[in-house]
Amino acid sequence: MINTHSHLFDTQFDADRDAVVARAMAAGVRRILMPNIDVSTIEALHRTEAAYPDYCFAMMGLHPTSVSENYKQELSCIEKMFEVHDYRAVGEIGLDLYWDQSRLSQQVDAFETQIQWSKLLELPIMIHSRNAFQQVIESVKKYADERLRGVFHSFGGTLDEAKQVLELPGFYLGINGVVTYKNGGLKEVLPFVPLNRLVIETDDPYLTPVPYRGKRNEPAYLAYISRTLSELYQVSVEEVNHITSANATLLFGR
Ligand SMILES: [Zn+2]
């Protein structure tokens, strides 16, 4: 399995990160991709990547909930990081109207700026979209071409929204612990989405899958997402892992 979205560098793992990584490896997680949040998390992100070479890989970007008054300054620091470090994607980027609606125009500006970087850098984007699907897809369509590709991370939208993503070649839905929740809504949508447009993720330490819901999430729990998908698609766990890993490799490289 490839875990396409983990915040393993989060302080919640400071006390037992080696054990968390050992459990992920034992559970069959072959690789962990880590999206950045903002300038304040870069050091921990790089430190975690360096601690687990050829296993943890960093992305770089400014998360929409970190878009504040001085976001232009923050963006210019983040842009410079691409000159000195190799990243697997631009992320996580997008729009979040759940926590704060007052900065929509700044969020859109930061999002679209980073979409444009991704095309120049030839990197995929890791999209965070919360209560903002229509605005997000509008920005993506505005820049859509054969170079633009990525993941709608933590997808929990409607069938109509899923179809809009599927219309964009090179874009995948990122499925996490929400798929294991009774009222998550995904069970009605996923039968219409082919497995070759899915990648899997944990989004740890958040969105812990059943049966650990309520506790801290960790990369090893990716196995519960893969198992739920195998039940939904009526294929083996191996098949789910094989297809979603191939999708992730196509997108993020080896
Ligand atoms: Zn995230």
Image (cartoon, rainbow, N blue to C red):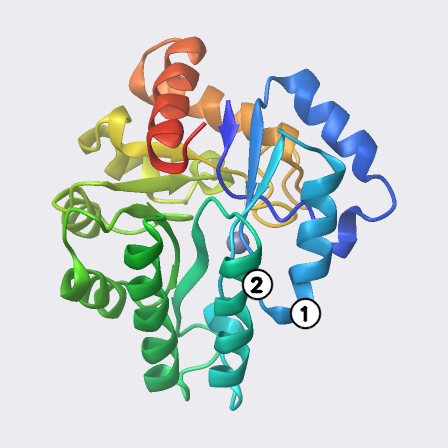
Please tell me the numbered disc located at residue 37.
Answer: 2
Could you say which quadrant of the image residue 57 lies in?
A: top right
Ligand 1 within 8 Å of the CB at mark 2: yes
Residue sitting farthest toward the right? 15
Q: Is residue 100 visible?
A: yes
User: Which of the image's four quarters has the C terminus?
Assistant: top left
Please tell me the numbered disc located at residue 75.
Answer: none
Mark 2 burial class by Cα count in 10 Å: few <14, some 14-19, many 20+: many
Viewer-nearest residue: 149 or 65: 149
Position of residue 85 relative to residue 69, above or below, is above
Residue at 74% x, 49% y: name it. 47
Residue at 51% x, 51% y: name it. 59
Mark 1 burial class by Cα count in 10 Å: few <14, some 14-19, many 20+: few
For the residue marked with disc 2, what is the amino acid?
A: Ile
Horizontal and vertical percent position of residue 3 = 52, 33
In the picture of the structure, the residue carrying the numbered disc 1 is: 40
Ligand 1 within 8 Å of the CB at mark 1: no
Left or right for 47, reference 73? right
Residue sitting farthest toward the front? 83
Horizontal and vertical percent position of residue 45 = 67, 53
Residue at 40% x, 45% y: name it. 184
Mark 1–mark 2 CB contact (< 8 Å): yes
Viewer-nearest residue: 203 or 82: 82
Mark 1–mark 2 Cα distance, whole angstroms, equals 8 Å
Horizontal and vertical percent position of residue 99 = 49, 75
Q: Is residue 216 visible?
A: no
